[in-house]
Image: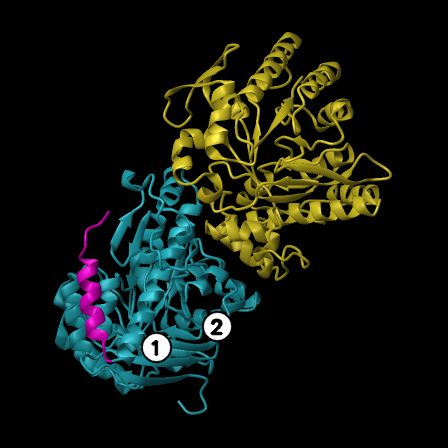
Chain colours: A yellow, B cyan
Amino acid sequence: MNGSPFAFSVLHVDAHSHARRSEFRTPHGTVPMPAFMPVGTCGAVKGITPDVLRATGATMVLANSYHLALRPGDDVVADLGGLHRFMGWEGPILTDSGGFQVFSLADAADVTDEGVTFRSHVDGSLLHLTPRRAVEIQENLGSDVAMVLDHVISLPAADTDVRDACERSIRWADECRRAARRPDQALFAIVQGGLDPELRRSCARRLVEMDFPGYAVGGLSVGESPDEMYQVLDATCPELPPDRPRYLMGVGRPQDLLQAVRRGIDLFDCVIPTRNGRNALAYTDSGTLRLRNAAHQRDPRPLDENCPCPACRHSRGYLRHLFMTGEMLGPMLLSAHNLTYYQRLMAEVREAIEADSFMELYDEKLSRMAGAET
Amino acid sequence: MNGSPFAFSVLHVDAHSHARRSEFRTPHGTVPMPAFMPVGTCGAVKGITPDVLRATGATMVLANSYHLALRPGDDVVADLGGLHRFMGWEGPILTDSGGFQVFSLADAADVTDEGVTFRSHVDGSLLHLTPRRAVEIQENLGSDVAMVLDHVISLPAADTDVRDACERSIRWADECRRAARRPDQALFAIVQGGLDPELRRSCARRLVEMDFPGYAVGGLSVGESPDEMYQVLDATCPELPPDRPRYLMGVGRPQDLLQAVRRGIDLFDCVIPTRNGRNALAYTDSGTLRLRNAAHQRDPRPLDENCPCPACRHSRGYLRHLFMTGEMLGPMLLSAHNLTYYQRLMAEVREAIEADSFMELYDEKLSRMAGAET
């Protein structure tokens, strides 16, 4: 990647696992990895201002091409100066290709080798997404990292369907690569192949031959068990080039992040911290708390005494009250807390890898997470 | 008020109007007046963290006893350290008595001279509010300023009903005064009397005889026209002692604030800036903007180039997008903007009074506010 605004360096590999401490340089800043990206679906992390987002420790965020192409339109975002200016986030941004959303949100998706035709979940209008159009949308948005268009199917699925979708994803990846024009945008490939380890391996090998600047593991978090997901990572990660970032899409729970880092994943995104925050579920090192429980009514303690987030300046009793009265401040504060929890976890992970103590952190965290819910 | 943690001083009276530049010292800080209090109904200003609230320039906030007594209960707030700690606001807080809410929100309010029996709007339970209980609730909450219990009726109303409610409010004010115990809480009286100037004057005189540390004009914003409200102020303000703060409850629009300051009012509260913010209506010096209008779709300008609020770091196009996609960030940012607009307006008002140029500001602002809506 000489002369490129992008550079990926592995600083250290953990002595007792495949966990990597790395850095990814982009036109909008450098991301210390392993890293977790909060999700700003429509160009906004739900309930979180850019100031609060920075304060959580986030360095890179994800936005959804599908949603932004529907509303306000990628041309509108381009007119307003591109996605960074639009959402007021000057750090690195990754956009997905819209593949996952088309298959999970849109009605009547009709797939051919050219692309997918679907109806907008917003107004029912008929739309067409091709590899070229997926690249065009992301170039209009101006994200630092764009993703290839892939064919995502829900699991379990018939072998022929999985194989068919995987083949199509590989062809589409190649088309996206040929269509991409912006030197300030890196295009990452997506490994598909369902739960079939051999298919995952061959998919990875064929994408690696095309020499992408980064690789994602896709098609997970679609109905499979955690163990099935970890097995897919066991099969896929060894096939990916060590000098390129590895991104596990749409995953996941804190324990999933630890499991994936152990297997060599560098980058994550997931709506869990914000979605659970809106639903009154808080992450702490002693397990999760359901804030609506009556047990918290008169509890003067913060969620976590060591957490610097704005929610932890209040009592659990106050946070519960906000949810019981339907105040939007409840979802706002708990989303900020959960995002801060995720970022603090990733910071601990990075430190532990540097100290070759990642597996100790992993054991400690996983045993605590198995603790009881309140 | 010697030896008291409270002190009110008029620093300057405008040369061309009754507008007063004053200061009100409370146990939680000094409030430069005229001042506008954002409303934190349930112990939270909707969509606004304490940090953002401070950044708007607010110095004092209002919370509703009625709502807090129902949920989480004033005893719970007391257990959690009182209202300041509960909501994370270390500045001055004023609580209302619950009178207005009982008559506007509760079902089947049944009024006797002892108090009012009503059903909770939350769970339908039967509750009883007396002058003593109104004081007890506010002493449990621990606000800096408490309000007497008053009997609020909607306007227009029959003369006998207005007179009856006014008499009852005066008796209740006296009962509250006798019940109040906390030296760190100032109890303000409320002038009632509907739209009858003579009744307003006599109510004010009788309350002034009881020597309260502050006086409110109540029973407005309940269906009367702006001009009727201004006439009530014309009748009432001259009866109030010049050395006590004057608070116009539940009012109002920016033009109402200017009209009332001109007549000698020092303190305001209103839900308008936050409620309108949640509904995509933005205040600017050139008039109001309806953010959902298609005209704003590709507009790269901020709402107001001189506004320091977090919304004004974004384009109008982005703010419109947030409302069109139902992102909670839209209500959050526009509430912060409108609160900042109100605080900046009050800061201009205070400066103009000091410079004896309040009426110039008044004329300029009122003519601009008459401008077209976009």
What residue sits right under mark 1 in the picture?
B188
Q: Tell me the quadrant of the picture where the N terminus of chain B can be found.
A: bottom left
The one of A52 and B158 positioned closer to us in this rendering: A52
Residue B332 vertical position relative to residue B17 in the rendered view, above or below? above
Residue A196 coordinates in the image, percent (x, y): 72, 15
Tell me which segment is drawn in magenta: B356-374
Check disc 1 and give the amino acid type. Phe
Question: Which secondary structure, mark 2?
Answer: loop
Quarter where residue A159 is shown:
top right
Horizontal arrangement in the rendering, residue B139 relative to residue A234 (left or right): left
Q: Give the mark nearer the N terminus: 2 vs 1.
A: 2
Horizontal arrangement in the rendering, residue B350 relative to residue B185 (left or right): left
Identify the mark at residue B142; answer none if there is no mark.
2
Q: Residue at x 37, y 56 (%)?
A: B337
Total marks placed: 2
Q: Chain of mark 2?
A: B
- Mark 2 is surrounded, within 10 Å at the Cα level, by few (under 14), some (14 to 19) or many (20 or more) other residues, namely many
Horizontal arrangement in the rendering, residue A167 relative to residue B368 (left or right): right
Check disc 2 and give the amino acid type. Gly
Residue B315 coordinates in the image, percent (x, y): 38, 46
Residue A164 vertical position relative to residue B62 in the rendered view, above or below? above
The one of B221 and B277 positioned closer to us in this rendering: B277
